[in-house]
Amino acid sequence: MIFKKFGRTHVNLVLITVVTVVAATLAGIFYTLQESYAVHMRIKQEYVPALQDLDSFEAHLLRSKDLIKEWAFVQRVDEDKNKAEMRELSGGKLKNSFLVFRTSSLKMNDYVKNDFDSLDFYLQNYISMCLEVQSLLPSFESYSDPIAQMEAEALFLENSGIPLMEQKCKKTLESLRSHLTSKMNTELESLNRQFDRLMIIIGLVAMFVVFAGLVIGFFAKQLRLQREETQAQKEVLNQLYQDLTDSIQYAQRLQSTILPTMGNVRQLFPKSLIFYKPKSVVSGDFYWFKNVGGKKLFAAADCTGHGVPGAFMSLVGHNFLNHVTKVFLDPAQILNNVNRLATEVMKTNSSGVRDGMDIALCSYHEDSRTLEFSGANNSIYIIRNNELMELKATKRSIGSFGEQGENFHTQKMQLESGDMLYCFSDGYADQFGGMENKKFMRKNFKSLLCQISSLEIAEQEKALQHTFDTWKGNFEQTDDILVIGIQVS
């Protein structure tokens, strides 16, 4: 009885010990899995976005350095696209990029606030010097002033001025990158230490009971798989990011070859403007000009989507227009034949989403001031003496894939000197913003055009930009934006 009681007591003790160890081990496993998932999510939702924002800001900084140096040392016309890009960067884009990076980083790194304060100080000085270069050499003619050019070039002396501020910004960015990377590595090291301790516990528990060892081994395997999966996902994301970057850069190079420069546009229409703001690096909107057969053809087109898909659609639409206008010059005939080509080439995907193009196409005969128009969903506005007249488009997109609908028709209108003609995509009117985050709407767009139509062309473009920025505020740009304005001479 004593032996049985003794044996039974020890069995109970062993069972209690095994149950206790297994329960503690299972609790440790679940805790470690939970912590590893939390680390994974912090890296994905906090560290990766912060490092991406850092890279974006650094790219803007380096780009601005090249552009402002080119501004100071290379004489270019005022409408040069690099100058326009530099004005955009120094006018707020570079600062906004810094603020985005600062916001995402300070959510988890209060201890780097001093670095951000220093970077803010260096950046303010850097931007001020860039603006000083622009003020010293504001126009093409200002480069003939040797004193102004000397003062501008003096800001680029080694270890001073703009190079010094840029170096300090880069050095501070490297410090911030080091902080973020170090903190992320600390998280990963902590996860590895937890994993190592768990392996020891699993080994000890396996000595007590095979079943407990099998269970622990299962959870350990899951943890290893999760860590391997995280690493594999990181590699896949890096490759996808690189592929996406390469695709965007390639699409940008392709699209830049089809868009005419403002110099070429103003050879056809001296008093003209193009307000063009892609949502991404590349755009589904494009503008097209051609002088053929005594007529000046021009169009504002909006292809399905934006970004890379929209950009490739714009290449297709541009090529169709060039091809068809070798034979046809009447706007309706052009659109009917472009639609025929598009219907043959474009396909409907399984989701029912159609690839297509909305377009406003005009033909202008300068000698007689006769305007011919045909549109696919995109109308045009003519403003004369502050009165807006609308030539309405056919309610049908290019690439209708054989759907029932009327053919496109040409409308004619006699223009007068001083008339303002506007053709556009729907991006401006569809932009969300304002106090209640609502669309700008066509009504407000028409009112805006009436208000600015009597201004000089340059002032009209500034007014479009200012109104758009004010309405948009901090909201995301909704779509690609294109507005073409032409004043009849």
Image (cartoon, rainbow, N blue to C red):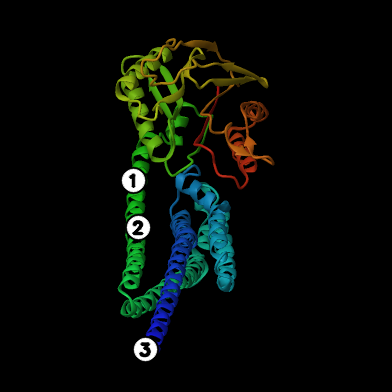
Q: Residue at x 46, y 10 (%)?
A: 409
Q: Which amino acid does label 2 sit on?
A: Gln
Q: In which quarter of the image is the N terminus?
A: bottom left
**Residue 185 is at least partly visible in this image:** no
Q: Which residue is drawn at 54% across and 16% down?
A: 392
- Distance from the alpha carbon under mark 2 to that under mark 1: 21 Å
Q: What residue type is labelled 1?
A: Ser
View extreme (right): residue? 435
Element class at badge 2: helix
Residue 247's mark? 1
Left or right: 313 in relation to 387: left
**Residue 421 to residue 87: above or below:** above
Position of residue 351 measured from the top left corner of the image (x, y, whole percent): 39, 30
**Residue 443 is at least partly visible in this image:** yes
Q: For mark 3, what is the residue?
A: 3
Q: Pointer 3: residues within 10 angstroms few (<14), some, or many (20+)?
A: few
Q: Quadrant of the C terminus?
A: top right
- Distance from the alpha carbon under mark 1 to that under mark 3: 79 Å
Using the image as rendered, state which of residue 409 and residue 100 is in the foreground. Answer: 100
Q: For mark 2, what is the residue?
A: 233
Q: Residue at x 56, y 62 (%)?
A: 102
Of pointers 1 and 3, the one earlier in the residue sequence: 3
